[in-house]
């Protein structure tokens, strides 16, 4: 698979949460013979050489799942404050890039090809935001051009990036991504994931 030729784009994998609804670190749950976190990192690396993984809760334990992979780990000491703190940590680590894709460690059906489609769509449309659309909403994975980094760095701790997407909908493109509906938050989600 050919990586997109966009100069300096990266992928930020948000994986800092404590998995309270799961009762154990969901990043370490097995999917196709490997931890979810490693699966997410390997998929990202197929699309892009610049992959940043944001860790927080149990960071030392989760680092072991990434052993040997050429990824940059950004530790978020404020992870308990909410998703906004992890987005800020990831964007800060990506400050030298021209654009980033924000994605989660617990959306195992997302493909490297979809990541590349986000970037190509940004190039083709010149829209600075290209977002996934699923289940009647928008969200990650989402591409943000560098001009939107200040908006992401200004997020409140409890905020995700959806507000930025919706506030700037006239500068965004939406791509259908039903695969993004499958995320793993609870034991029931994990059981359902095993059937797909």
Image (cartoon, rainbow, N blue to C red):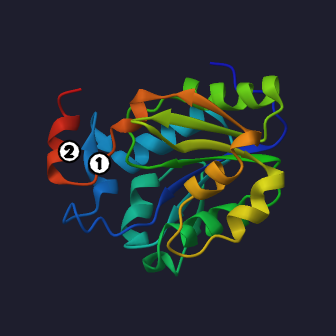
Residue shown at 68% from the left, 40% from the top: 49
Q: Is residue 125 above or below residue 131?
A: above
Q: Which residue is mark 2?
A: 190
User: Circle 2 sits in a helix, a strand or a loop, which is it?
Assistant: helix
Quarter where residue 113 is shown = top right
Out of 146 and 61, give the one closest to the viewer. 146
Out of 183 and 127, give the one closest to the viewer. 127
Quadrant where the N terminus lies?
A: top right
Out of 85 and 96, give the one closest to the viewer. 85
Residue 107 shows in the view:
yes
Give the x, y percent position of residue 23: 18, 66
On the rendered structure, is 80 left or right of 126? left
Give the x, y percent position of residue 32: 28, 33
Q: Which residue is mark 1?
A: 184
Give the x, y percent position of residue 174: 61, 32
Residue 75 shows in the view:
no
How many residues crowd around disc 2 within 10 Å: few (fewer than 14), some, or many (20 or more)?
some
* Residue at the farthest top position: 1
| Tag 2 near tag 1, CB within 8 Å | yes
On the rendered structure, is 180 left or right of 88? left
On the rendered structure, is 43 left or right of 129? left
Quarter where residue 73 is shown = bottom right
Q: Is residue 31 above or below residue 195?
A: below
How many residues crowd around disc 1 within 10 Å: few (fewer than 14), some, or many (20 or more)?
many
Q: Is residue 11 above or below residue 110?
A: below
Quadrant where the C terminus lies?
A: top left
Residue shown at 74% from the left, 41% from the top: 170
Mark found first going from the N terminus, 2 or 1: 1
């Amino acid at each position: 698979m050919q990586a997109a030729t966009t100069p300096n784009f990266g992928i930020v994998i948000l994986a800092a949460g404590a998995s309270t609804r799961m009762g154990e670190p969901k990043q370490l749950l097995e999917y196709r013979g490997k931890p979810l976190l490693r699966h997410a990192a390997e998929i990202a690396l197929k699309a892009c050489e610049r992959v940043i993984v944001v860790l927080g809760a149990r960071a030392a334990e989760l680092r072991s799942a990434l052993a040997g992979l050429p990824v940059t780990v950004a530790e978020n000491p404020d992870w308990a404050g909410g998703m906004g703190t992890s987005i800020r940590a990831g964007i800060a680590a990506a400050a030298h890039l021209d654009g980033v894709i924000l994605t989660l460690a617990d959306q195992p059906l997302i493909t490297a090809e979809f990541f590349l489609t986000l970037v190509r769509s940004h190039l083709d449309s010149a829209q600075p935001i290209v977002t996934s659309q699923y289940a009647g909403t928008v969200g990650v994975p989402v591409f943000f051009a560098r001009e939107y980094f200040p908006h992401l760095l200004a997020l409140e701790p409890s905020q995700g990036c959806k507000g930025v997407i919706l506030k700037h909908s006239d500068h965004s493109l939406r791509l259908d991504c039903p695969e993004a509906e499958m995320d793993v938050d609870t034991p029931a989600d994990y059981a359902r994931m095993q059937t797909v």
